[in-house]
Amino acid sequence: MTESILPIPWLESGDEVTPLPDPETALTEPNGLLAIGGSLSPARLEAAYRSGIFPWYSPGEPILWWSPDPRAILRPEQLHISRSMRRALRRADYDISLDTAFDAVVRECAAPRADQPGTWITREMQAAYSRLHTAGLAHSIEVWRDDALIGGLYGVSIGRAFFGESMFSRAANGSKIALIWLMRQIEAWGFDFLDCQLPTPHLESLGAVCIPRKRFLLALAASQRQPTRLGPWHLDIQLDDVLSTSRLGDSQRLR
């Protein structure tokens, strides 16, 4: 007997109220496709992230909503900082900030790359996340050198989860420095995990792992029972905190 496949729901353009489907109904091929259409309003995006769903689509396509299985996450206590990265961090030939150049970070993330001439971060997406930033739910971390932006990343924070969207580097280790500082800061604030969505060698080198979607959704639900730390954010850690070993015990790790 062949397994029946439910049709992918199509939402009317601009629809902000029709709930997205249960992530468990997402397609296995392509991995995690859940729904098509709708809007990128702050309310729609917040509801999607709380449910383990994110938008990802190319220019000229309708909005595509995803919840892949497995899911890549990075736990603060499992962050791996290599010896070479520790040396780069100790040089301190950079400055770090939070939420001071959100739109600039998003534009840099959207810029074409040598191995990826196109971008999924369309102007529509940039405007949507800028609205989330204004609402206090989207955040950026910036790495500066001589007043030039050399690295950073942006994402969404709801409850005690941070949903990473994209990162960029304009100098060696720019994105890694940004991610490491962010992970240590959200660890200090008691966050549960950073959602990486899909695995990459870059993220895996820093300690990201893949877990089954069902397990991810359980961890996400637990994180959403905690209050959201609304922006703007400000760093309250120092370099010594970044270079120290993790302060979380085994009892606090995701199971």
Image (tube, rainbow, N blue to C red):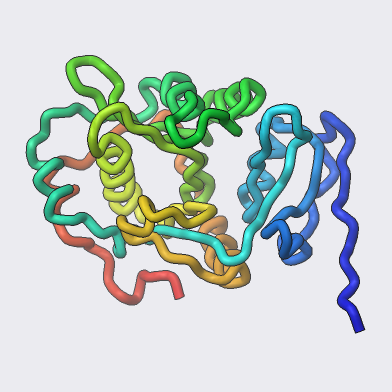
Residue occupying image coordinates x 51% and y 41%: 165
Looking at the picture, tell me which residue is in the foreground, 179 or 230: 179
Residue occupying image coordinates x 68% and y 38%: 57
Q: Residue furthest bottom?
A: 1
Q: Where is residue 17 in the image (x, y as percent from the top left)?
A: 83, 40
Residue occupying image coordinates x 80% and y 55%: 21
- How many numbered discs, if any? 0
| Residue 150 can be seen, yes or no | yes
| Residue 160 can be seen, yes or no | no
Residue occupying image coordinates x 29% and y 43%: 176
Query: Is the residue 26 above or below the residue 142 in the image?
Result: below
Q: Position of residue 187 (x, y in %)?
A: 32, 53
**Quadrant of the image containing the N terminus:** bottom right
Query: Is the residue 66 above or below the residue 60 in the image?
Result: below
Query: Is the residue 26 above or below the residue 117 in the image?
Result: below
Is residue 204 shown left or right of residue 165? Answer: left
**Quadrant of the image containing the C terminus:** bottom left
In the picture, residue 71 is in which quadrant? bottom right
In the picture, residue 108 is in which quadrant? top left
Q: Where is residue 215 in the image (x, y as percent from the top left)?
A: 56, 71
Q: Position of residue 133 (x, y in %)?
A: 52, 28
Is residue 41 shown left or right of residue 209? Answer: right
Is residue 134 shown left or right of residue 100? Answer: right
Looking at the picture, tell me which residue is in the foreground, 220 or 103: 103
Looking at the picture, tell me which residue is in the foreground, 74 or 64: 64
Is residue 57 shown left or right of residue 113? Answer: right
